[in-house]
Image: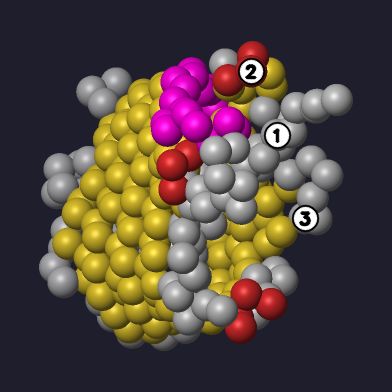
Amino acid sequence: MSHWCYAQHNVLYSQYYFSGILINPAYAGSQNALNFTSIYRDQWTGIDGAPRNLSIGLHTPLKNEKVNAGLVFLNNRYGITCETRAMGVYAYKLKLGKGSLAFGLQGGVEYFKNDISKIISTDNGDPVFEQAVEKSISGVVGAGLFYKSEKVIAGISAPILYSTRKNYVVAYSPLILSAGFLVNLNDDLVLKPAGLVRHIKNSPVGWDLTSAIYYREAIGVGLGYRSNDAAYGYLDIRLNDQFSIGYCYDYTLSHLNTYSNGSHEFMLRYIFSYKLNTKSPRYF
């Protein structure tokens, strides 16, 4: 007797707040400028087959001030699996009080490849592992809401709401709540607390809490905690008005700590100068 088993690998970026389009399509265009952000994550170093993740987000406002658009590219490698996803993003923004509320949709394709030949079997000639490569292509759709004012952000999203893979609604993909705000401590220092909550069916609720202090809008140092998984610290450096780089180190708190040397994450961001008329794009 055999049964279907659905598994998932949901990437957990510690620097998600620098590229909100990765978790919420409604984030597109929220910085009133063309934004390019890339994050590379080397997770659980020291473990063979541990996840390696690359993300690229590009988004911009359009001529119609209510309409924003973007592109998202993801490449995730873990074990014998290589997962590549490319999506187009559309967001519609409405004025709401002192801020704005955006509705976002994204859709695209997802390509899976399993290199079965990399599996080491205890039974030579096992027919299950005779097929060298297993491939599949599916369509994916996601949605989200995102609110932003000068000092507050909040959002709810389902990055993959539906997939044509096995033709089912993705009940085991995360529903994500996120929020953050800014506090001016003095003329030079800004405090940025932020948080994220993930809910996946039949799994414990997961959450991240972070807090960073920025000096003169140029250098940010922060700490974070991911429930039952890791504590992390990060550094964000703004090299000029458009160009920023960041680094984050995760210290593993789970039992994987015995085998892992932690996780490393690198961020590169360029904000093009046109329409850049807001004070806080480098914070969120």
Q: For mark 3, what is the residue?
A: 205
Write down the region rendered in magenta.
127-142
**Picture residue at 27% right of the left edge, 35% below the top:** 60
**Picture residue at 58% right of the left edge, 31% below the top:** 127
268 sits left or right of 182 in the view:
left
Between residue 86 and residue 255, name the one nearer to us. Answer: 255
Q: Which one is in front in this view, the residue at disc 3 or the one at disc 1?
A: 1
Q: CA distance from mark 3 to mark 2?
A: 26 Å
Q: For mark 2, what is the residue?
A: 166
Between residue 146 and residue 197, name the one nearer to us. Answer: 197
Q: Which comes before the other along the chain, label 3 or label 1?
A: 1
Q: Amino acid at mark 1?
A: Tyr
Q: For mark 1, what is the residue?
A: 6
Residue 203 x/y as whole percent: 79, 50
183 sits left or right of 274 in the view:
right
Residue 61 in the magenta stretch? The answer is no
Q: Are marks 1 and 2 in contact (CB under 8 Å)?
A: yes
Residue 201 shows which numbered tag?
none
Residue 174 x/y as whole percent: 66, 42
Secondary structure, mark 3, is: loop
Q: CA distance from mark 1 to mark 2?
A: 10 Å
Can residue 153 be spotted in the picture? no
Between residue 192 and residue 5, name the one nearer to us. Answer: 5
Q: Which comes before the other along the chain, label 1 or label 2?
A: 1
Picture quarter containing residue 284? bottom left
